[in-house]
Each structure stands twice: as C-alpha cells, then as structure tokens.
Image: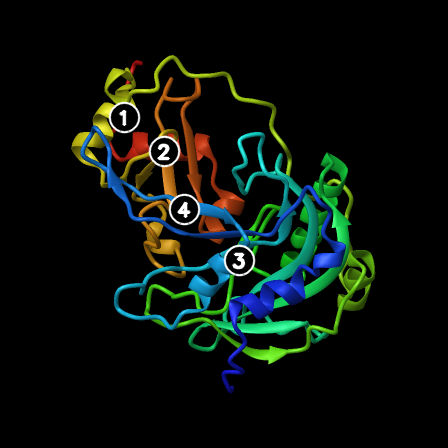
Amino acid sequence: MLDLKIAASQYVEAAFPADLLSVCETPLISYPAEPFTDENGLPVYWHKHQASTPRLLRKVDREVTDSSKGEGWLFCVSAVQPTAEGKVKARLQDVRTAFVFPLDDIGTKSKQPAVRPSVILETSKDNYQWHYFIQPFDVSTAKGQAYYDACLVATAKAGINDPGVRAASRLVKLPNAVHKSGFITRVVEWSPGRSWDLPELMAELGVEVIEGAGRKFKGAAAPGAHSDLADVEDGLWDWMQENWEIRSGGSHWIGVKCPWESEHSTGAGSPTSTGYSPKDYDSANREFSCLHAGCKEKRDTAQFLEIMRRKGAAWRT
C-alpha cells in the first residue's frame, strides 16, 4: 500500500475537530521519555504526556532521524481534562469525550472488519490499525466508560480487534510513530469524512455489545506501607531478585519476565509489558499484570503466585 504522507498534525485536526472540543478538554499526545535509573539501579521507563499544541505536533511531524528514532508517538482516543496543576494524564478519571474507536492488529491477529474505517495505519509491516472517527461520545462517567469498553470487548470477541485493546483512556499510534523494528507508522487509507455514532458503528460492524461486559472497575486499593523498594519485606520479591529476571523499576510496578512469555505471540515485548508489585509497595497486596493479549485476558495474580511456587519460590512474608 502507498504511504499517503498524512502528518500527525493533520490526523489530530481531523480526529478531534476544534469546534467539537469543549473549553476544558484537549487531545493528549504521548511518547516514551528517556529512561532513568532509580535508587535500586533499575531502569525506569515512562511516557511523557502533553496536551496537543501546534508546536508539539510540528515536532511529531519531523522526519524521523537516528536522533529521534524510537519516539513512538501515541495519542489518547479520548480528549482529556487537564488536572488542577495544568498537567494532562491518560487515566480514566481524566478522560471526557471519546473521538476515535480503534481496532488493532488487523491482518495478523485480527481479521478484516466489514466496515471500512476513517483511517488505516500500517504500524509494522503488513500489520494495521483501523481507526473509526466517532461523534463525540461522553466517557466522563462510569456508564460511558463501561459502554465504550464493552464495545472493545465485543469487537475482540468478533475477532476484529486485539483483546488487549481496552478502555476509553487507550493510547494508540499516530503517523510517524516508530515501531521497535524500525518501521515508521504510515497512513495507507485516509477517509476522515467517514464518521459514526458509536452504537450505530457497532450495529454496522455486526457485533453485539453486552452491557456489563466491559472492564470491571476496582475500588481504590489499600495503600502500601512503603514507597521505597528497599524497605519492602516480601519473601517472594526477595526470591525473585536472586532467581528471576528483573527488567525495570517503577513507583508501583517492577518490570519482570512473564512466566508465560513463551506463549506470547510477540515474544518478550517491552521491559514494562509485565509487572509485579511487591507486598506493601505502593499498595498493600501483591499484584501481577501482563499486557500481552493472552495473559491480560487469562492470567491473574493468583496464577502468578502459584507458578512462582512451582518454580521454587517460597515465602512467609
């Protein structure tokens, strides 16, 4: 397919029409910032979130060079409301209005939908994201967020979306994003005039949206006793430091090797794809998370603890 040379600035302008944005919301642009080393000697990977501005988009539009290679430009599918400090964050409590509905991994893990989208991006060789521009859909409430997420679940069950694509706070690729292979995301189909009401789009796609099938939102976790990893008393974490591959640090999640990594279709993924949060580190309980589609749907903390025991881990605390 031909590269249509659509710039990120053109994309954002088309996806988030200025006259449809409220005065208290803005598109959010995200990109990987330079990792730093924490006090435990672990690299910390993080994304910098910024409000979409003409100046920032000019940076996104620049030709990718060796100096900028690796900048994986992303945007949030929903416009967000800045915090009281003026910062923007890609959290569910910050999203207000969804403008884009994404389908991921078309041509590889997902089959081609029956409805042509507003935009098709080739994000790696022969692998595509289909983006549907939607009429502003309110995701500022739990009800709106749950419905949007149920739509993502429904399309995944229909085989036209990656099951790992979830939530109205989802970040997806912009033109000029760089894949880990070095492939530069490009627009290969551009029909921004196509726009749908979200429920009508689901009907055209032929998927059944089941209320309550979306994300199950947890209440706030009990806080942990420690914010410094060195103060944590967790026998499993002690064992893992001696016997398991630790890939990155963080204020809540520690990047680790997934015990089911051999089942990942994409292999190891990024150093932060799989995380373990030790007991009393930021939150009271041990937690496990893996962002790979199969694990995200099928694996939980209890299974992680069980497989760690099978691998020889033993702990009292």
Q: Amino acid at mark 3?
A: Val
What mark, if any, has residue 276 been given in the picture?
A: 2
Q: Earlier in the sequence, mark 2 or mark 4?
A: 4
Which of the two marks, 3 or 4, is nearer to us in this view? 4
Q: Earlier in the sequence, mark 3 or mark 4?
A: 4
State whether residue 110 appears in this view.
no
Side (left or right) of 48 relative to 54: left
What mark, if any, has residue 237 been given in the picture?
A: 1
> What secondary structure is found at the residue carrying circle 4?
strand
Which of the two marks, 3 or 2, is nearer to us in this view? 3
Q: Earlier in the sequence, mark 3 or mark 2?
A: 3
What mark, if any, has residue 172 been given in the picture?
A: 3
Residue behind mark 4: 47
* Contact? badges 1 and 4 (CB < 8 Å): no
State whether residue 4 appears in this view.
yes
Q: Residue at left 65%, top 57%? A: 157
